[in-house]
Image: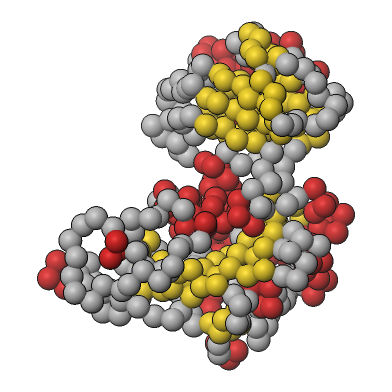
């Protein structure tokens, strides 16, 4: 209920039947409704603030996902959005047909395996990037037209900096992913490799370190490989595009005597970065870590997805929240004030409903980018009923919250 309200829903509660033997259900809605009524002015006539737009369409589900929409459409979407929540990066869904109208508010667009796209929809994404916007595309994004028929190459191949190596195989790519063993013991090799200068056992012939790693690989300084678990097809990479990870094909995991890489290095790209003449940053992730993150919940996948989005957005994120826990962050504006709703999703059974126990988290340190019309030096906390200092520095303010049990709403202005 609280996360729905934070996301913009107006609450409505309905009891089925006029008589109930389980009287505990009367305690669910009443405290939420009392609190919402007391603070209703902050939950109407507000505009969400987000610089990340996650692109969707029903056509992609119907004509690309078809009878396997869970694997090809739902899991990639879920992986991207869960990575954003985990990284405390506000985002908004945006329909692919509305990009020319709505995309100006975003610094980066995300195409989570958006395979089915019309020429007009592709042109909208291209215009956004040519104006300097960032783009993260995963999997087979733009490889099929609006009816799910395969193209010979990615419609945004020039932006991705990558092309299908064998156009005849384009129609089989999704089928290969669909039929691939999801427990495949495959990896991504990070470039450049660093293990020769990292503490641990060393052997002759370790690759020399040939340069610094890109910022999107921050946090992976002590590993040359990341778990993947999927399959990849060869691609042709344009001159000037950067390949930061390559595919390591699956190899046995049992018995232990056979658990060694049969092909430790390939030229098959798993992550490509590119830039455009207009200054747009493009990250293309053929290795569909969004789908893998939704399925496996590996922290490495979530961290890399968040790094890529921040890089493509040029760190134009209006919010930073530091501290423990899984916090869903919803930032909105009303005339003269900002509203930040923090929902504590920390639970021993996160992503599995119902929540058995509320676990308090904190302290949390919040940093917000302030609009010019917001001048207050204090913030109201609508759940605990307290007022805290909002320290202002260079167009941003910093707030510290000692603890959150279920949620907190911060109002500045």
Q: Work out whether residue 221 or residue 272 is closer to the camera in this orientation and state it.
A: 221
Query: Where 70 falls versus 412 (above or below)?
Result: below
Q: Nearer the viewer, residue 23 or 296?
A: 296
**Residue 272 sits in quarter:** bottom right
**Residue 118 against residue 311 in the figure, above or below:** below
In the displayed orientation, state which residue is furthest to the left: 257
What residue is rendered at 63% in x and 70% in y? Answer: 274
Task: Please state the horizontal and vertical placement of residue 292, each as a whole percent of the image.
Answer: 46, 58
* Image position, residue 371 (x, y; %): 80, 31
Quadrant of the frame with the N terminus: top right
x then y, percent, for residue 250: 32, 73
Residue 240 in the figure: left or right of residue 364: right
So how many labels did they put on this image? Answer: 0
Residue, x 69% and y 38% (percent of image)? 318
Q: Is residue 345 visible?
A: no
Q: Is residue 3 above or below residue 78?
A: above
Residue 250 vs residue 16: left or right?
left
Q: Residue at x 49, y 83 (%)?
A: 234
**Picture colour scheme:** secondary structure
How far across and how far down the image is residue 193, in percent?
Answer: 36, 68
Q: The C terminus is located in which quarter? A: top right
Report whether 153 appears left or right of 198: right
Image quarter of residue 36: top right
* Residue appearing at x 61%, y 42% in the figure: 89
């Amino acid at each position: 209920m609280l996360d729905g309200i934070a996301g913009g829903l107006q609450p409505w509660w309905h009891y089925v039947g006029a008589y109930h033997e389980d009287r505990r259900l009367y305690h669910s809605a009443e405290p939420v409704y009392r609190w919402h009524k007391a603070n209703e002015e902050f939950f109407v006539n507000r505009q969400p603030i987000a610089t990340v737009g996650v692109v969707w369409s029903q056509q992609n589900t119907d004509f690309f996902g078809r009878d396997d929409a869970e694997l090809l459409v739902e899991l990639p979407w879920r992986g991207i959005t869960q990575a954003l929540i985990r990284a405390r990066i506000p985002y908004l869904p945006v329909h692919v047909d509305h990009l020319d109208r709505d995309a100006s508010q975003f610094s980066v667009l995300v195409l989570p395996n958006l395979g089915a796209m019309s020429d007009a929809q592709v042109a909208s994404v291209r215009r956004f990037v040519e104006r300097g916007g960032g783009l993260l595309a995963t999997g087979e994004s733009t490889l099929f037209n609006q009816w799910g028929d395969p193209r010979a190459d990615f419609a945004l191949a020039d932006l991705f900096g990558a092309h299908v190596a064998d156009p005849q195989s384009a129609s089989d790519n999704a089928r290969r992913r669909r039929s691939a063993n999801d427990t495949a013991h495959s990896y991504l090799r990070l470039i450049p490799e660093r293990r020769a200068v990292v503490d641990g056992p060393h052997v002759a012939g370790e690759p020399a370190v040939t340069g610094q790693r890109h910022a999107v690989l921050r946090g992976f300084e002590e590993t040359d490989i990341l778990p993947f678990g999927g399959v990849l097809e060869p691609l042709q990479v344009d001159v000037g595009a950067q390949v930061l990870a390559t595919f390591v094909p699956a190899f046995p995991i049992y018995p232990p005597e056979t658990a060694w890489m049969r092909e430790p290095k390939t030229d098959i790209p798993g992550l490509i970065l590119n830039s455009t003449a207009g200054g747009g940053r493009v990250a293309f992730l053929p290795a569909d870590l969004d789908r893998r993150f939704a399925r496996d919940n590996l922290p490495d996948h979530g961290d890399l997805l968040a790094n890529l989005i921040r890089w493509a957005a040029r760190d134009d994120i209006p919010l930073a929240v530091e501290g423990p826990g899984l916090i869903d962050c919803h930032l909105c504006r009303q005339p003269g004030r900002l509203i930040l709703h923090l929902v504590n999703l920390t639970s021993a059974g996160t992503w599995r409903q119902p929540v058995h126990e509320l676990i308090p988290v904190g302290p949390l340190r919040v940093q917000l980018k302030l609009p010019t019309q917001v001048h207050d030096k204090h913030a109201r906390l609508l759940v605990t009923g307290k007022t805290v200092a909002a320290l202002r520095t260079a167009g941003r303010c910093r707030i510290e919250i000692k603890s959150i049990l279920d949620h907190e709403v911060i109002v500045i202005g």
